[in-house]
Image (spheres, helix red, strand yellow):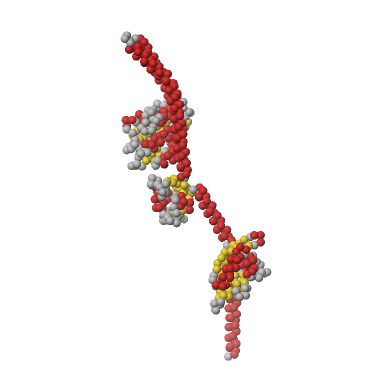
Amino acid sequence: MVGRRSKNKRPRTKGRLGKHRRSAAEIRRSEACMAEGQRLTRTGTWALNVVTKRCFWSPELFRILEFDPASTDPSISTFLDRVHPSDRDAVQQNIDLAIHTGKDFAQDYRLLFGGGTTKYVHSIGHPVTNKFGEIIDIIGAATEITDRVYAERALKRSEFYLAEAEKISHTGCWARNPTTGELFWSQEEWRIFGLDPKKTELSYQMFLNMIHPDDRPSLEMISTSAVHSGKPYDIPFRIVLSDGSIKHLHSVGNPVFHESGQVREYIGVTMDVTDRKLTEAALQEAQSELARVARLTTMGEFAASIAHDIMQPLAATVAYGEAARRWLNRDVPNLVEAQDAINSAVNAADRASEVITRIRALLRNDKPEYLAVDINSVIRDVLRLTDSTLQGRNVLVRIRLPADLPQVRGDRIGLQQVIMNLITNGSDAMSSITDRSRILRIESQIEASGSVLVAVADVGTGFKPGIADRIFDPLFTTKSNGMGLGLSICRSIIEAHGGRLWASPGSPHGAVFQFTMPIWKQAKTLTENTESAALQTPIPLD
């Protein structure tokens, strides 16, 4: 029995030693894993005995505090000496509060090192009680968050700079999910639209409701087309604020794609260009007024010159006519003298006619050197100059300008004057229209005759067919405040280029003005009287 008992005891002792060895190894492995985890997360652990005031610091906490474990005895005072003076009282108060109340705490504070180096730490603490409910220890963890603090500061600084840049440039940022309709607006975007984000539910429909009615269809069409094709878009439009005021905006959007290739969202910017538009409109108005004054001044000088040149022959014509009447009214008419007076009157009238002919010749022949001109480029330049005026009058411009159109022979400035006059006339003709959209169509095409044809059509009040030719006569006008010189000058300019300008009633509304220009390569073979049946065929404006 004894032998058997002795024999049986040995294995049990050996088994207990094996378990102890395995437990010690597991503990060492667990401690190594914990130490590595603390190092990777920059989190050190600590414990404070509230009775003995003795402290425990993990190796990672020694590293964070930059103390040597071999030469430093962990203590509250040693720790507090490392805390930034400005944060020290708050740290001490939180520890004392946890000891007295048994409540957990969390706080951020700074550590100050030699040379002024600073670290930021986030620390948490938890009181531990015995079976009698008495607090015996405070255990916790401290995580170094210096990198996070600097990253957050950099992010806030970047956000601040972005917000300031948006405010200065009047540019807001936005994002839109075309599938769900979810929107994001930056603070400046809200300001541009005059809305309070705290009082307004943001939605795409709310955005559309603010778009000017005349701009809404084109914006929706461009936006929808861009989403379907996955392409960027760039569009100007107007919004109507709650007080009825109008803002001019310019929006640019770029798509962001899923890995599948589908559009995930559009992100972009909205620029408030109202001030620029108003400035352009004011500048345009000032330029128009200056041009008007200059025309009136030039006209006055020109009229004075004409009056001076033709006054003498006209006065002589009257004098000879009176003389002839006197010779004929005698009791015995002196037919010879009367004939001489009549001949002299005719000669004086011829001299007056010659003066006018010379003036017209001067106007028609004193022209600059003609060069190769891209007429489509001229049209676009004029549209840029008149953009503010046309938008202010709610005129929608529709253009059809073929890219392969040949260059014409002409004077760019003179052609600009013609096109601007036709566009302005078309806009004026639609100023009283309220029952239909005010649409101005501008098109160009190559003619079989070797000329380029340009058409400007409006949907305004139009004119009667019987006066289609008279509207080009000097001093004839259908406007209440017109001078009757614009179209006359335009026709002179076009004819001086070897082309032709004519007008016809539009269908069902408005008027169509068309002119031809010789293309550059055939310029030398065309004369100022070039005409063909093709010139009478208007561009179909549908």
Q: Residue at x 36, y 35 (%)?
A: 512
Can I make out residue 226 in this image? yes
Q: Picture coordinates of residue 263 (x, y %)?
A: 44, 53
Direction right: furthest residue: 71
Q: Quadrant of the C terminus?
A: top left
Direction bottom: furthest residue: 1
Q: Residue at x 49, y 48 (%)?
A: 170
Direction top: furthest residue: 332
Q: Picture coordinates of residue 90 (x, y %)?
A: 58, 66
Q: Is residue 124 left or right of residue 451?
A: right
Q: Is residue 468 above or below residue 77?
A: above
Q: Is residue 401 above or below residue 211?
A: above
Q: Nearer the viewer, residue 217 or 280?
A: 280
Q: Residue at x 44, y 45 (%)?
A: 248
Q: Picture coordinates of residue 449 (x, y %)?
A: 39, 31
Can I make out residue 499 in this image? no
Q: Quadrant of residue 340?
A: top left
Q: Quadrant of residue 355?
A: top left
Q: Is residue 357 above or below residue 414?
A: above
Q: Is residue 290 above or below residue 206?
A: above
Q: Quadrant of the N terminus?
A: bottom right
Q: Nearer the viewer, residue 327 or 352?
A: 327
Q: Residue at x 36, y 33 (%)?
A: 480
Q: Quadrant of residue 534?
A: top left
Q: Is residue 477 left or right of residue 39?
A: left
* Count of marks, rendered view: 0
Q: Nearer the viewer, residue 285 or 126?
A: 285
Q: Nearer the viewer, residue 105 or 472?
A: 105
